[in-house]
Image (cartoon, grey):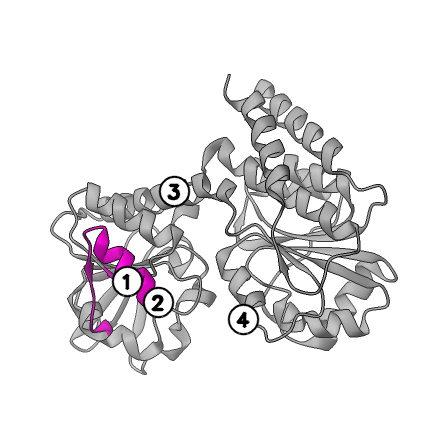
Amino acid sequence: MEASERARLDTYFGKIAGHFAPPELPSSLLVTHLLPERPAFVRAVGAVTNLRAVLPKPKSIDSAARREIEQAVPCDELSRDLFANADTAVTYLETRTAGDDVVLLDVGGYFAPVIDALCDRFSGRILGVVEDTENGHKRYADRDKLPCPVVSVARSPLKDPEDFLVGQSVVFSTEALLRGRGDILHGRPALVIGFGKLGSSIARLLHAKGVHVTVYDIDPVRRAQALSQGFSVARDRDQAISRAGLVLCATGALSLRGEDFPLLRNGAYIATVTSSEDELELDGLPDGYTRSSSGESVTRYSTTGHYFYLLNNGNAVNFLHGASVGPFIFLVQAEILAGVRLLARRDLGATMHEVPADDRATIAATWLNYYNR
């Protein structure tokens, strides 16, 4: 990042942090993709909270960004296992934020499995969670009862540009990997599993490249939306998997079970928009499959009479090329800071919440002032 761009970004976040900083700063733990531009956002989080630790998502860590952040705040290893066990999770919070009022800044619902234990057993107080992704939104919203407020920015209109551009980066990276093997998208029918914001963006972009796209989604409303937009909609999921030469998983949940992989046609490619632990049940592959490298970031799975290719080890394929969505990501990051202020008021009910429209308008106006020159 050029010095002038870095200065503009820091000034923008300074303006946002000044507007949304609560009178009394809570402590925080931050889950985040640690991409090259991310230190500016981390510093902004540190301006509106007492940031106790950053937990970088393991498949998206830029080493220079991590070194910069570690000069100011600890970076701890993140895994689903860390927050799968209540005892382990509570112990971790006690080591970092014992006795504090804490806001949990989440990307993908990492805290969801143990949020009850954290609220009940932690020596401090969990003020709530700010969740960034649709995957995480579902993990919290699907619970019968929440023990604390959750402010979700996953369905904010400020996230629409990011979702579209992430879709672009997924298609770009997928095509780049295929071309690296002397292959192309054209003539390879695609199946997009999941027709949410990302899946619909990916489907439209593939269609624009002349790819025949079939869509599958468990939600009949989304299937109807896909049909209305001119896409083929699979009536039989297994049959759609067996016919696809490219399968793009965009559910944010489990897209392909272990028993689905043998259905893939020989030579099919699989790509995802999130981590393999969420989208793919690779541990459930039938016995007999072996894996081998088949070019940069392409893994070949094979057994007698059957083989398929997995891109980027099943992790978000766009992170191979930086996953950049330009300055539009700063809109969403600013909304996360606005979510912190909401939780710091300590008066929200234990349910799902959104950032008020007036705050979104303030964020958009500030962003336009810096990035629409």
Q: How far apart are labels 3 and 1 at the CA level?
A: 19 Å
Q: Categorize mark 4 by other alpha carbons within 10 Å: few (<14), some (14-19), many (20+).
A: few
Highlighted magenta segment, given as a residue range:
215-237
The reply to whether discs 2 and 4 touch (Cβ–Cβ < 8 Å) is no
* Residue bearing mark 4: 142
* Residue bearing mark 1: 223
Name the outermost residue toward the left.
187
* Residue bearing mark 3: 164
Dot placed on the residue nearer the N-terminal end, 3 or 1: 3
Relative horizontal placement of residue 353, taking residue 368 as reference (left or right): right
> Looking at this view, is 85 or 198 the one in front?
198
Q: Nearer the viewer, mark 4 or mark 3?
A: 4
Dot placed on the residue nearer the N-terminal end, 4 or 3: 4
- Residue 168 visible somewhere in the drawing: yes
For the residue marked with disc 3, what is the amino acid? Phe
Magenta stretch containing residue 218, yes or no? yes
